[in-house]
Amino acid sequence: MAKYTENELKKELETQEYKYGFYTDIESDTIPPGLNEDTIRLISKKKNEPEWLTEWRLDAFRIWQEMEMPDWAKLDFKEPDYQAISYYSAPGKGGPKYKSLDEVDPELLNTFERLGISLEEQKRLAGVAMDVVMDSTSVATTFQDTLAEKGIIFCPISEAVQKYPELVRKYIGTVVPKTDNFQAALNSAVFSDGSFCYIPKGVKCPMELSTYFRINQAGTGQFERTLVIADKDSYVSYLEGCTAPMRDENQLHAAVVELIALEGAEIKYSTIQNWYPGDKDGKGGVYNLVTKRGLCEKNAKISWTQVETGSAVTWKYPSCILKGDNSVGEFYSIAVTNNHQQADTGTKMEHLGKNTKSTIISKGISAGYSHNTYRGLVSIGRNAENARNFTECDSLLLGDKCGAHTFPYIDIKNKTAQLEHEATTSKIGEDQIFYCNQRGIDIEKAIALIVNGFGKEVLNKLPMEFAIEAQKLLEITLEGSVG
Amino acid sequence: MDLKDKLISSYSSLENQGDKELLTIRNEALKIFETKGFPTKKEETWRYTSLRPVIKEDYNLFPKTEQNLSFEEIEKYLVDDLDAYRMIFVDGVFSEKLSQLTEDKFEVSALSAAFQNEKYEEIIKKHFNKIRPQDDSLSALNTAFSREGAFIYIKRGQALDKPVQLLYLSTANESAMMLQPRNLVVIGENAQAKIIERHQSLNENPVFTNSVTEIFADKYAVVDYYKIQKDKENSTLIDNTYVDQADNSNVSIQTFSLGGKLIRNHWKAAQNGERIDTTFKGVTLLNGKQQVDHVTLVHHAQPNNESHQDFKGMFDDKSKGVFDGYILVDKIAQKTNGYQKSDNILLSDRAIAHAKPQLEIYADDVLCSHGCTVGQVDKDALRYLRTRGIPQKEAYALMMYAFCSSVLTSVTIPELQKNADAWIAAKLGVDMGFHD
């Protein structure tokens, strides 16, 4: 035990396989690969969407055609062939909806059980309502009634389009416009499904809302669209977690998440991302190219927490637009990369209102041949009196073949702004390990302790339900060092 | 005709001093400028800075004759009470009359003269244009056009007994003027040098200076380089300084950026040895519509090195400050300590500060950090000073001085430090000394 060294840890990290990789064989309703206006009309038709939404998608598609994938990120990957992707896939032939669990394909349920998130279990565990998304269509929604009592709407976005078209139409694309970026435009054109959540005025959502996204059909891109609206003085905590089966070709995931926190509302959005990172030679893995952004009105608060352990490529910047006075934005992130994974992640805090505050805590851990980049922007506008920002981004390097990079942008246009930015890069200190050894803690446990301590500020921000899972993930990603 | 075309078409009329090899270097550099042109905001490092208003002026590229200036006229641009060697350039021409060289004690001369001198042939071949990033368009432009500058070569084991002051004057009597000085500084093993550089226009016409300095520090060499940037409000200065360091060398570059319309310090240091120390520091105090950019790169290419960057900026009125710092640590550069700091105070609602402190790290056993702050003068401290009978303006000035003291106090030439204090007091509009 005591002979366990960092080199051994490295070796273990390299050889360790993705634990959650398996493929569920379910018949699915998949349209042929390719993307043109007809594909978009077909998707729209299959989902029985109103005319305005079809037009909205087509408009986005036209914008997308004019755009190019940006190359500023510190990522090196082959851009997917957008014409080789099938843009719609629903589990079960033509079956858009299941009424109860009995109707759900047993194999699918089995998949979730193996992931440790079986619906039965979830149902029993009061407190978490699951809107399970397998590939693109929601297959089950639970706790609908409990939420309905409070007037909370929590359903697949395709259902919301049918039932609450005004709400969707009013808010969709207001935070992440179609023109925002290449991937967001693509998502706007072809988004398949996702979650929709509306919390009415003054309501505190009694349970953590959660969704599980999965990519399951070979060659299927997943284009989720999530829209969370918290009306005045309401509160919601939203969880999102991902695992994906082992697959050799790269899969594209271009999601868009829009959060709208109206006056006095608070949204807490937590993510655990553990998609297939590719094997130890960097073959395969998911491309996670996501646009996440929230808008804060007066006195509102949005808090992003993320634990990023998976994906071959991560390109993700959950951001806050602090439009209203006294609004607050937070970003807590742990990104762990191993083998040949690449992550370019961070946040944008746009201070527009007076007395706005933001906090950024980002922890990057890189091992193997991976590259872990923090990229962030703190912008304080001309009218943002007394804005306050605190940024801390720390990187931990395990091994000498990985890289850790920091690219912060700071733009200040108001003299009353107060801003602090700190970043450090280091490895686990030998003196720290020595200290632990002296007190009878072996090297393996010491490394675990130190890595845990390193990420603690962020892990603490996760809701209870996720904290355990997050720790599990850290264990798996850096197996041998944690726990 | 825009400036780029004007430059390219006038290139052929320039006569080449030096040998064929130099001509090839210049021709190639021109080609790079021809393809790349002046940088635009689309380039990442230029995203906050536009050269358009600068290059739209009609500059006189080849001033005709040497102006007749007396020493009394230019004395005020030298550091007060400082006993130093000096090299004075007027409109891009070295003025023997105004300069005071080291005689035969040290190898300090005009670059054009060094090109003609056989004894420097090897040194120049080995160093000239060797560390300039080849694809950089502005320094390529300088390479093609520059004909004069300082050549400072300190041989092994020698230490300059007095600092060298470099003063580049532009008369720009009739029209706007563009200048492209080129300096080559080679400090040999165990040698030492202190250099002070200043660019000064004598008239209100716009002056556009695009300067390139290459500094080579051999083993155990110590170089202290100060840049005084307080020109007239119509002047633009692009300062490209490239440093190459060998084992145990210590290079420090420090700037006082107080005047001019646009100043852009584009500094790069490559650490090609071990136990090297690189220091970049700067005090920036701006008002009006001034802008200062500090774009730095420290490349840790070998293990066991250190770098320190410390920039203090104070911005009033509609001024703008940009800090774009970069620390690059190669895979083999273990045990690197890299520090980067950018502190800013905004004094007006229209002032803008941009900061981009970046780290790119490929080695695991390193200690690298960057810090960036934006804030105000502490109101409680200000009140404390007021209660002791210090007027508002002076109290402010004291606080600002304290804010940038970590940079000012590291100046190793006492006369220069005293001068810098006075410049800062003048810029802050107070008549006081910060030391008793």
Image (cartoon, coloured by chain):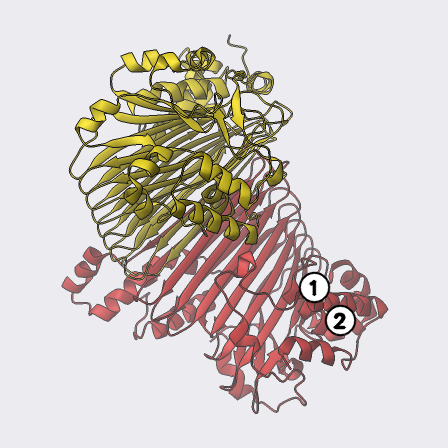
Chain colours: A yellow, B red
Q: Are discs 1 and 2 less than 8 Å apart at CB?
A: yes
- Which numbered mark, 1 or 2, is in the foreground of this view? 2
Foreground residue, B260 or A157?
A157
How crowded pointer 2 is (Cα within 10 Å; few <14, some 14-19, many 20+) is rated as many
Q: Is residue A387 above or below residue B389?
A: above
Residue A406 at what x, y percent from top left? 49, 43
* Amino acid type, mark 1: Tyr
Q: Of the residues under marks 1 and 2, which one precedes in the sequence?
A: 2
Q: Classify mark 1: helix, strand or loop.
A: strand
* Amino acid type, mark 2: Ala
Check the residue under mark 2 and report the chain it is in: B
Q: State the residue position of label 2.
A: B114
| Image quarter in which the C terminus of chain A is found | top left
Looking at the rendered structure, the number of numbered marks drawn on it comes to 2
Q: State the residue position of label 1.
A: B153
How crowded pointer 1 is (Cα within 10 Å; few <14, some 14-19, many 20+) is rated as many
Q: Is residue B319 left or right of residue B333?
A: left
* Both marks 1 and 2 on one chain: yes
Check the residue under mark 1 and report the chain it is in: B
Residue A245 at what x, y percent from top left? 53, 20
